[in-house]
């Protein structure tokens, strides 16, 4: 796993003034909002006996342990032990890790690393047209597959004709070599592929869009755990049907991932239809998971250990980010972008720990 990055870890609407547990990176974290609405993030484990704070309660913007009622403030420092007499000093070890958080695009982002504030990367920038004008629908679930393998599926231009052949894949006209340019940045990478037409001229979609529409796809990687698929169907940008599929992958262990999805659409943006579109998006996501979960090696192997073709270029770029040798965090030079390959760290995930 990559360290010293901002992880999209929870939907903003899911966190309130009650403790909320998230499991990620083989660790438990607890989130809650203080009286000013700010999100607080702590390690979800009391240093006394190890109970989960997420079973406790919020009091005076602090969190109480559910086991013995120890009280911890937002910086993780214990400020009260009920069983001690008033005036008894608090042990120095009575503290818990706290984590920087930000909110943007409907997500809570947790910084997992040890960089000082001035050296931390900025949050990614998503397309303005999508987040400001399109209707979002939210969904989440737990997949029995490796987070990076699932991300690879979302960065793959050609798997749709096989994995999604029973839904929409049979309409994708892939009948020639797929080659494209990958634009690589410190924070990730992006690539585009346009297809000449979509389906037969007799389809209702083609009639609606005035002929055989083009299919335009743009896939983006935002390190460490977010992918975005932008899909446009039509001939004229002013009349195109557009979708954006934004996915945050929370790695629990090598074989388990919490997946949080946002489907953006510019078609039929009625709240009444959100359930319909959520159901479609969930079905397509599960088509990916069913196949990805069967891969022999869940943690991504070295690039040389598997076969590759030209159409795998974006996935290979992702693997290079993941498989770069461990470098010291102090050697990173991050300003407005995410850390480069040279400053990234790789962690090994093991068994998950649940509440």
Image (cartoon, rainbow, N blue to C red):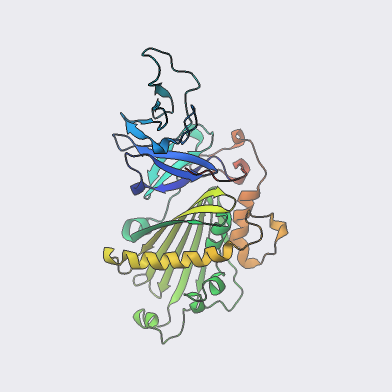
- Left or right of 217? Residue 313 is right
- Left or right of 285? Residue 3 is right
Position of residue 15 measured from the top left corner of the image (x, y, whole percent):
35, 44
Position of residue 81 measured from the top left corner of the image (x, y, whole percent):
40, 21
Foreground of the two, 231 or 258: 258
Foreground of the two, 285 or 316: 285
Position of residue 320 measured from the top left corner of the image (x, y, whole percent):
64, 52
Image height of 87 relative to 328, above or below: above
Position of residue 278 measured from the top left corner of the image (x, y, whole percent):
38, 64
Work out which residue is located at the far top of the displayed protein and give it.
Answer: 87
Image height of 198 relative to 79, above or below: below
Report the residue at 49% width, 65% height from top: 286
Report the residue at 47% width, 75% height from top: 168
Work out which residue is located at the far bottom of the displayed protein and give it.
Answer: 202
Foreground of the two, 151 or 208: 151
Foreground of the two, 7 or 321: 7
Q: In which quarter of the view is residue 73 placed? A: top left
């Amino acid at each position: 796993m990559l360290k010293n990055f901002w992880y999209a870890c929870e939907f903003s609407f899911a966190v309130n003034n009650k403790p909320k547990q998230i499991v990620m990176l083989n660790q438990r974290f607890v989130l809650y909002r203080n009286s000013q609405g700010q999100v607080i993030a702590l390690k979800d484990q009391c240093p006394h006996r190890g109970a989960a704070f997420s079973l406790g309660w919020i009091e005076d913007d602090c969190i109480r342990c559910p086991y013995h009622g120890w009280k911890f403030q937002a910086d993780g420092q214990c400020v009260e032990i009920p069983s001690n007499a008033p005036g008894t000093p608090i042990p120095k070890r009575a503290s818990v890790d706290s984590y920087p958080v930000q909110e943007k695009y409907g997500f809570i982002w947790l910084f997992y690393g040890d960089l000082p504030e001035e050296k931390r990367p900025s949050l990614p920038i998503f397309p303005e047209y999508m987040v400001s004008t399109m209707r979002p629908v939210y969904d989440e679930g737990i997949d029995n597959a490796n987070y990076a393998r699932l991300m690879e599926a979302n960065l793959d231009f050609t798997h749709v004709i096989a994995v999604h052949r029973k839904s929409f894949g049979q309409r994708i006209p892939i009948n020639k070599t797929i080659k494209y340019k990958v634009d690589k940045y410190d924070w990730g990478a992006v690539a585009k592929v346009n297809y000449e037409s979509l389906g037969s001229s007799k389809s209702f979609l083609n009639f609606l869009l005035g002929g055989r529409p083009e299919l335009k796809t743009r896939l983006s990687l935002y390190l460490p755990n977010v992918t975005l698929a932008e899909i446009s169907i039509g001939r004229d940008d002013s009349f195109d049907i557009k979708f954006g599929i934004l996915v945050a992958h929370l790695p629990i262990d090598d074989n388990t991932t919490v997946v949080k999805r946002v489907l953006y659409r510019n078609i039929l943006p009625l709240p009444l239809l959100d359930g319909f579109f959520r159901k479609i998006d969930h079905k397509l996501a599960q088509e990916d998971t069913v196949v990805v979960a069967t891969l022999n090696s869940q943690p991504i192997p070295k690039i040389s250990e598997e076969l590759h073709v030209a159409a795998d270029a974006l996935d290979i770029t992702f693997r290079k980010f993941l498989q770069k040798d461990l470098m010291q965090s102090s050697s990173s030079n991050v300003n407005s972008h995410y850390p480069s390959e040279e400053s990234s760290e790789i962690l090994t995930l093991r068994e998950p720990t649940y509440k």
